[in-house]
Image (cartoon, coloured by chain):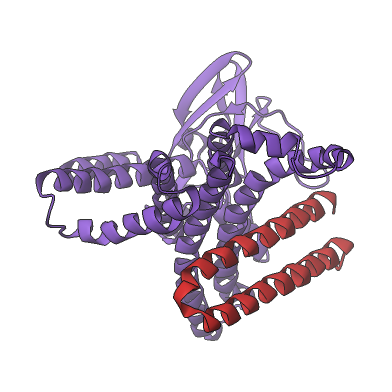
Chain colours: A purple, B red
Amino acid sequence: MRVFILVIFVSFWGFTNFSVKASDKDVYGRNETEEFNPMDAIIDHISDSHYWHILSYTNKDGQLAEIAIPLPVIIYFRGRLSIFLSGEFNHGTRVVEKGGNYFVLYHDKVYVTGINGNLDLNEDGNPNNERPLDFSITKNVGSMWLSAFFLLWIFIYVARRYENHPSTPKGVQSLLEPIILFVRDDIAVAQIGENKARKFMPYLLTLFFFIWINNLIGLIPIFPGGSNLSGNISFTMMLALITFLITNINGSRNYWRHLFWTPGIPVWVRFFLIPVEFIGLFTKPFALMIRLFANITAGHIIILSLVSLIFVMKTIYIAPVSILLSLVMFMLELLVAVLQAYIFTLLSALFIGLAIQEEH
Amino acid sequence: MELSLTTIGLGMIIIGAGYGIARIAQSAMEAMGRQPEISSKIQTAMIIAAALIEGAALFAIVVTWLVG
């Protein structure tokens, strides 16, 4: 197993390119001479990327060099699927030609351009150019695979140990057992009920551990962390959507009756309640989505702002303050990582529990 | 950073949500002090109520963000 992981990492390193950019602009598109803009730097750090950035440094010639893993770009444009490594873009400085169409990378997004690669920028600085359908394996996707692989590895190992040695928990097994029991007893059984909790345990456990591990990986500032997966709204949207589907597919007759024809109140009030209840159906997963996204993104922005203080003030004397404060924030974020995983799982269990409830 | 209506609106949302969650936490802690034996149940109820308020606040934040 360890050898397998080693092989994966070595093959990753094989792809690693050491590129020196011709222009004096770095990947974030800012000039070296220009004033440091903390907001742009922060947004670039928390957003998804076609490169898995490892480090950048100033080389002997005084140019900014970059060590980054180019990730596969998969784009679909005018009926043609193109697959190539993002290294071909050379950090946005080169125009890539695929099947007669020209593509450039601008702020980590792929745009369609002419042969000269010029972008048509509007007054906000956003390009008006057309965009291809982008199915790329970006940094976030790679990080998600990594965490899924990691979870599978741990849990398959633990499950196998339970089969072989049912009585003696050992090592990582005794670390996970109380957490699994906590999810079962305090989340699933408490919200869904003894009889039906078992059916939803796989989903709730997956949700808890997947969100937790991704929150933690997002906090690692260096490779192979450094991606902000749970602070990506598409990721949280998919999780919320799955909860929404599970809730409504398992909804009992009673649940639907309460939604569209609430019993126990005057008939004319029922008509007013239908739209309210109907909107409520969507606000619950919507709030789930925004809650996780906003909490994780806000934490990352605070930490990056504290680090940015050094570059804004342009003095080393602010560094101890900045490092100390970001250390405290990191500690808080470790708590938030598990808390948000817990809250997401708890609320999912609660919604499921409310939906499957029979009449009493 | 310029002061806009959006910023003021965001501040008001935070005041409202913060007040609501603070009230929940206050009541929950008082209840836990009176009946420590059911504190885990109170804690769950507290988190659910806080999450509902937070949901409303997040909804308002997103609307201000989209409008402003």
Q: Residue furthest bottom?
A: A317
| Front residue of A348 and A131 | A348
Question: Horizontally, is A112 left or right of A165 in the view?
Answer: right
- Which residue sits at x=39%, y=48%? A205
Question: Horizontally, is A27 left or right of A126 in the view?
Answer: left
- Which residue sits at x=61%, y=24%? A102
Residue A81 point in image, percent of width and height: 53, 18
Q: Is residue A283 visible?
A: yes
| Front residue of A9 and A88 | A9
Q: Quadrant of the N terminus of chain A?
A: top left
| Front residue of A144 and A336 | A336
- Which residue sits at x=57%, y=21%? A76
| Position of A41 relative to A210 (above/below) | below
| Position of A228 relative to B6 (above/below) | above
Residue A318 point in image, percent of width and height: 55, 83
Question: Horizontally, is A360 left or right of A179 in the view?
Answer: right
Q: Quadrant of the C terminus of chain A?
A: top right
Residue B41 point in image, percent of width and height: 50, 66
Question: Horizontally, is B9 left or right of A182 in the view?
Answer: right
- Which residue sits at x=17%, y=43%? A160
Q: Is residue A229 visible?
A: no
Residue A271 point in image, percent of width and height: 85, 37
| Position of B43 relative to A320 (above/below) | above
| Front residue of A354 and A275 | A354
Q: How many marks?
A: 0
